[in-house]
Image: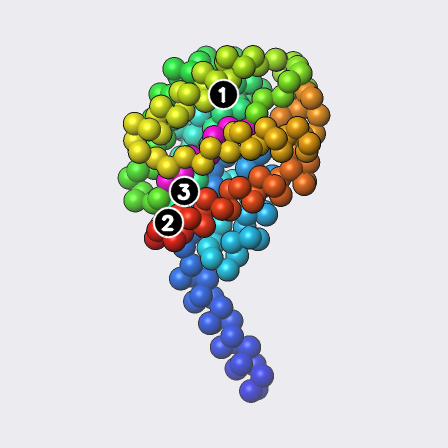
């Protein structure tokens, strides 16, 4: 009986400690799905980290789903990214995707996120692949990629959203740990390295809470 009481007491203490931790929501596509488990592990003593269900896809999906993803939870930090789907389309290939529509969608998302009172951080998009992407066969040129990146940065500057500009370092990681020349994804080691960059910036934000 004494052992059972101790076990229950320990569970209550641990549960209370978890409830006291800041809550972080990560919104993004399969790239963020790849690094989030490593971020969650790295921050397990500092915060509770969650990811939107599934793949956030393109910015228009974000506009439609943001309320559902936020739910009724009180988030302390929301990290978000959209970009690769806006460039490649994939299942949304028939939807107009331009830097202008991308910026308009991001602005709607930012305005909604601002209402939560959470600390916001935008993560810049990881690189496109150099070859014809394995699913849609598109090759995205550097000018188009830059136009989308700059459109996003313009919105974040306008609304004073903190930016984690991982684009440059992710290019170096992709060079050595990308799945292939026609695939935007990373190997497990690549995701671990991306997680390190994500974790560093999230820790800085946690110190500000």
Task: Using a 10 Å C-alpha cutoff, classify the residue at mark 1 as few (fewer than 14 neighbours), some (14 to 19) or many (20 or more).
Answer: many
Mark 2 vs 1, N-terminal side? 2
Residue position for label 2:
76
| Residue 25 vs residue 159, the one in the foreground | 159
Q: Quadrant of the N terminus?
A: bottom right
Task: Using a 10 Å C-alpha cutoff, classify the residue at mark 2 as few (fewer than 14 neighbours), some (14 to 19) or many (20 or more).
Answer: many
| Residue 205 vs residue 8, the one in the foreground | 205
**Residue visible at 55% across and 37% down?**
32
Q: Is residue 4 above or below residue 96?
A: below
Residue position for label 1:
86
Query: Residue 126 placed where, x, y %?
Result: 55, 28
How much space separates mark 1 and mark 3, taking CA atoms? 20 Å
Q: Are marks 2 and 3 in contact (CB under 8 Å)?
A: no
How much space separates mark 2 and mark 1, taking CA atoms? 27 Å
Residue position for label 3:
78
Q: Which residues are magenta?
A: 120-126
**Residue visible at 62% across and 33% down?**
173
In magenta segment, residue 191: no
């Amino acid at each position: 009986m004494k052992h059972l009481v101790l076990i229950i007491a320990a569970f209550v203490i641990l549960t209370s400690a978890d409830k006291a931790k800041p809550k972080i929501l990560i919104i993004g596509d399969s790239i963020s799905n790849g690094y989030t488990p490593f971020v969650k592990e790295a921050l397990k003593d500092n915060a509770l980290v969650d990811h939107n269900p599934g793949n956030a896809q393109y910015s228009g999906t974000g506009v439609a789903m943001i309320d559902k993803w936020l739910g009724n939870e009180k988030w302390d930090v929301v990290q978000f990214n959209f970009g690769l789907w806006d460039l490649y389309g994939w299942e949304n290939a028939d939807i107009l995707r331009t830097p202008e529509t991308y910026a308009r969608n991001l602005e709607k998302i930012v305005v909604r996120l601002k209402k939560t009172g959470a600390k916001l951080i935008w993560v810049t998009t990881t690189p496109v692949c150099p070859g014809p992407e394995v699913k849609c066969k598109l090759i995205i040129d550097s000018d188009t990629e830059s136009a989308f990146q700059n459109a996003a940065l313009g919105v974040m500057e306008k609304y004073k959203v903190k930016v984690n500009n991982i684009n440059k370092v992710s290019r170096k990681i992709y060079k050595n740990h990308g799945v292939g020349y026609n695939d935007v994804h990373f190997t497990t080691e690549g995701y671990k390295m991306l997680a390190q960059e994500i974790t560093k910036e999230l820790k800085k934000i946690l110190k500000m809470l």
